[in-house]
Image: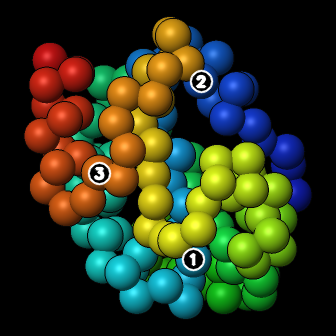
């Protein structure tokens, strides 16, 4: 994470407060990623108290750009990066070849329930799941 602490998706999913986790692959240099931020901020504000968490996985290679984007864009959820650009270890595990990309995971089962939720689609899905 930005403070140098290890965070794993499995630990985030094991947290009893979390029902669904959005694993969101992004980078500060990615225009479409930045365009999705208003939707992510709104969903996080609306559903984080109901069991929704975001784990942002950055494909940045410059630490300062990564941290500046988190702060400037008020991305108050969890963040990780190994600063290895497209060779990011987590991105390789998820076979990420374009960003933004995301996976909505059910924490109880570990099942990916939806992928690449963009714009208002994330809110619609979460409204249904977190009734």
Q: Quadrant of the N terminus?
A: bottom right
Q: Residues within 10 Å of mark 3 (few under 14, many from 20)?
A: many
> What is the total number of numbered labels drawn onto the structure image?
3
Front-most of residues 43 and 82: 82
The local secondary structure at tag 1 comes to loop
Q: Decide if residue 15 is on the left or right side of residue 6.
A: left
Q: Decide if residue 2 is on the left or right side of residue 35.
A: right
Q: For the residues marked 2 and 1, what is the alpha-carbon distance in whole angstroms?
A: 23 Å
| Image location of residue 86, percent across then percent down | 72, 74
Residue 122, relative to residue 97: is it above or below? above
Q: For the residues marked 3 and 1, what is the alpha-carbon distance in whole angstroms?
A: 17 Å
Q: Residues within 10 Å of mark 2 (few under 14, many from 20)?
A: many
Residue drawn 59% across the image and 68% down it? 97
Report which residue position mark 3 lands on.
117
Lower position in the chain sequence, tag 2 or tag 1: 2
The local secondary structure at tag 2 comes to helix
Report which residue position mark 2 lands on.
13
Report which residue position mark 1 lands on.
27
Q: Is disc 2 in contact with disc 3, using a CB cutoff of under 8 Å?
A: no
| Image location of residue 28, percent across then percent down | 55, 83
Q: Decide if residue 11 is on the left or right side of residue 48.
A: right
Front-most of residues 98 and 38: 98
Residue drawn 30% across the image and 24% down it? 50
Residue 95, relative to residue 18: is it above or below? below
Residue drawn 70% across the image and 26% down it? 10
Lower position in the chain sequence, tag 3 or tag 1: 1
């Amino acid at each position: 994470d930005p403070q140098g602490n290890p965070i794993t998706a499995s630990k985030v999913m094991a947290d009893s407060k979390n029902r669904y986790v959005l694993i969101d692959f992004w980078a500060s240099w990615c225009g479409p990623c930045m365009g999705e931020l208003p939707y992510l901020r709104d969903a996080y504000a609306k559903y984080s108290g109901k069991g929704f968490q975001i784990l942002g996985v950055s494909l940045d290679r410059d630490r300062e750009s990564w941290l500046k984007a988190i702060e400037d864009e008020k991305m108050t959820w969890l963040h990780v990066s190994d600063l290895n650009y497209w060779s990011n270890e987590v991105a390789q595990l998820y076979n990420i070849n374009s960003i933004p990309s995301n996976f909505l995971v059910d924490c109880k089962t570990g099942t990916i329930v939806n992928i690449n939720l963009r714009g208002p689609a994330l809110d619609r899905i979460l409204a249904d799941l977190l009734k």
